[in-house]
Amino acid sequence: MGGKLNSLTDVLKKTLFFFEALSVAELAPHVQRKMLKDYSLPQVEEKVSLCLKQNECFYREKDYWRLNLEGNKENDQFYSLLLKKGQPQNLREILKNTNNKKKKLKKLLSEEASLISDGRFIQLDNGFWGLTEWEVETSHYSLKNLVIKAMKIYPGGLSLQQLHKVINSWRETDVKTLEGILRKMPYFELAGEEVWSYNPTVRVLYEDLLKKFLLMINKQKARWHRSKAQWKSKYDSIQKHYQEALSGKREAAAALAEKMELEGQHDHLLTQMAEKDLLLSLRKREILRYREHINKLEAKSNSILYQCRLWVKRAKEAQEEIARQKELLAKTQGSLEGLFTKLQQYKEKDRENKARLAELKEQHSTRIAELQTEIVELKQKAERERTSHIIEQRRLQEEINTLSNDLKKALRMEEEQQRSYLLAQQELAAAREENSEIERRLKNPLVRFIIKICGFFGKYY
């Protein structure tokens, strides 16, 4: 079917025809994938809900929307025409043969309005009309939705191979991807041995939780963007302060260079004055040397006195430390005795627990043995029932074979009777023709006269 769908109503018709029943939340991603790509998901859900409520071809059952495929009886002729053609048709070209243009325009408008509200028809973007039941483009739907569709068709459950066969009729895929989807989504449940089923209530709960989780993620993302903006403003302010500090540093460097020039001039003046004060400085050095010698001697005496005082203080501190260690030793001995008594108590409790554990192990082993015997008995019983079922199936198959042979014999006899009946009818028709021929010949007056004479002589005889 060439061309794209014309409106949101046509997309909803096509999607609901394929999936039979969907909620607004389930319809929104399909619609967003096919059209309304610039809208957010809540906006798409709002538009889908409004379209479903306004159009008569959609009806609601609980939380799910369905497509009404009965349609209007006025459109049955156009429906049969599309079925016959097998491809989209244009209403304007069909109604070209009418004479009155006003009537033609009114009829065209009424036809298109009734077709829009009819669930059997869809409109393409080139103005042509087609049928909803024609080929569905399954490439627009995800593999998960195709699996849900297959599970809804077979509510009793499907094995992995059966599901692969069903979905391959819509789209080519492999078993590994199907198994990955079935094990990933919690609303696909393993009903029995390799039989998968679909639970819609679990899917509703899962999607609600997913929406809440996405809402939390969006809130966290908005919070992160706010904090990022705050940190960016702080960084900008720090960068501004840093630029100001750099400019201040440059000014300080210029001032320091000026200061160094002044210091050089000052040093030159000092060297000139130093030549004059050389003699005075030599005498001052001798005096200072004597003073330094005296100060060194005083420092040595003070250091010796300080060391003596330190040794006395350390001796006192060592005696106090020994007394403290003795007290701590006495306390630790008392605590060790208490810990030893507690250790003995824990050992007794450990023995009791080990005895209880041994008893529980014995009870567990006996229970396991009983369960194993029950499992063996149940397996034997299941084997006996399987053999009886096979025998009964064979017996029924033999009865079916005998009945089919009897039916074939009866049909053969019926065919023979029909043949004999047809032969009898043919003989009867030939006898009737012969009789009519004889009656026709008897109508001749000469023949009647001869017959009367013969009858008279025969009577006489």
Image (tube, rainbow, N blue to C red):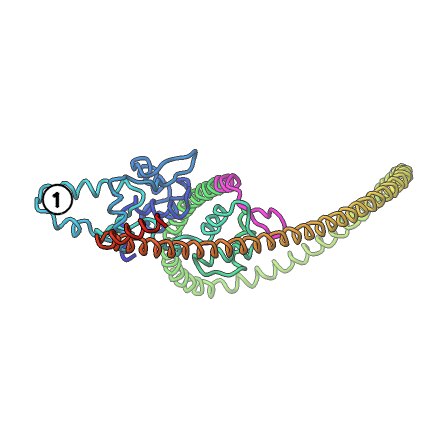
The answer to whether residue 332 is left or right of residue 49 is: right
Circle 1 SS class: helix
| Residue at horizontal 56 percent and vertical 49 percent from the top | 196
Evaluate whether residue 186 shows in this view: no
Q: Nearer the viewer, residue 226 or 427?
A: 427
Between 66 and 447, the one nearer to me in the picture? 447
Whether residue 446 sits left or right of residue 224 in the image: it is left
Magenta segment includes 192: yes
Is residue 203 placed above or below 286 in the rendered structure?
above
Q: Residue furthest front?
A: 460
138 w.r.t. 50: above or below: below
Residue 328 percent across, percent down from the top left: 86, 40
Q: Quadrant of residue 367?
A: top right
Query: Residue 173 placed where, x, y %?
Result: 48, 60
Horizontal side of 136 relative to 284 (left or right) equals left
Expressed as whole percent of the image width and height from the top left, the position of residue 368 reads: 81, 45
- Answer with the quarter of the image where residue 110 lies: top left
Q: Which residues are magenta?
A: 189-209
> What amino acid is found at the position of numbered circle 1 in the picture?
Lys
Q: Is residue 183 left or right of residue 452?
A: right
Could you say where residue 29 lies in the image, as x and y percent from the top left?
Answer: 39, 47
Q: Is residue 243 visible in this depiction of the protein?
A: yes
Residue topped by disc 1: 104
How busy is the neighbourhood of tag 1: few (under 14 within 10 Å), some, or many (20 plus)? some
Decide which of 149, 423 is in the foreground and name it. Answer: 423
Quadrant for the N terminus in the image: bottom left
> Which residue is at a point 59% across and 48% down the rendered structure image?
190
